[in-house]
Image (cartoon, helix red, strand yellow):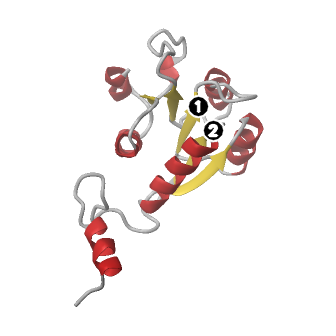
Amino acid sequence: MPTKSSRSRSDRRRVPRGGRRPADRPGKYPPLLVAESYDGVRESCSRYLDQFNFQVVQAAHGEQVLAHVAAEPPHVILTELNLPAMPALRLTQWLAQNWRTRKVPVIVLAEEGESVEALEFRNHVAGVLVKPFSLVTMLDEVRRVLRAGVPGESRQARL
């Protein structure tokens, strides 16, 4: 008879909503960068994405973002709207200047009170998540952006 801890571990793997899927195998998903100044949000997002075999790199401020992107450009960047030393607007401008990074999609993590629709750079972001958001919603948004490939028309409907 299985113990309680082994049974609960196997139960989590069978959860269809937000759980592991047959396509979630190690090495299948590309690297992601989570740039957030608040440790709680950054850690929880990173741990959740790591459970689904994403290679997650973390950054707490703009200088770390630039260092990670210069070393190896991630396939998706999740960034806070007003990240210290590198707000999302400046980050998208910086990414657009380099041929290696100009097609890296950016998902902006915005506060509830911030006016996301009025952002002048919304054509340069692949998606927007308004805090507080569920981790399942974040995972679905990352998967949607990865399926879409290079940011294009599909992101306009989301914004």
Asked if 26 appears above or below 63 in the picture, the reply is: below
Instruction: Nearest to the eye among marks 1 and 2: give it.
Output: 2
Q: Residue at x 51, y 25 (%)?
A: 110
Asked which secondary structure carries label 1, the reply is strand
Q: Name the quadrant of the N terminus.
A: bottom left
Q: Position of residue 44 (x, y in %)?
A: 52, 49
Q: Nearer the viewer, residue 115 or 78?
A: 115
103 or 61: which is nearer to us? Answer: 61
For residue 53, say whether it is visible: no
Q: Which residue is mark 1?
A: 80
Name which quarter of the figure residue 16 lies in. Answer: bottom left
* Label 2 Cα neighbours within 10 Å, binned few <14 / some 14-19 / many ≥20: few
Along the horizontal axis of the image, is 136 left or right of 17? right
Percent position of residue 57, x then y: 62, 52
Residue at 63% across, 38% down: 38
Q: Is residue 140 visible?
A: yes
Residues at circles 1 and 2 in contact by the CB criterion of under 8 Å = yes
Q: Position of residue 90 (x, y in %)?
A: 67, 23
| First reached walking from the N terminus: tag 1 or tag 2 | 2
Q: Which residue is mark 2?
A: 38
Residue 154 sits above or below residue 11 on the image: above
Which residue does the image show at 26% across and 69% down from the upper left? 11
Cα distance in 3D space between marks 1 and 2:
9 Å
From the viewer's perspective, tell me whether residue 5 is left or right of residue 57. left
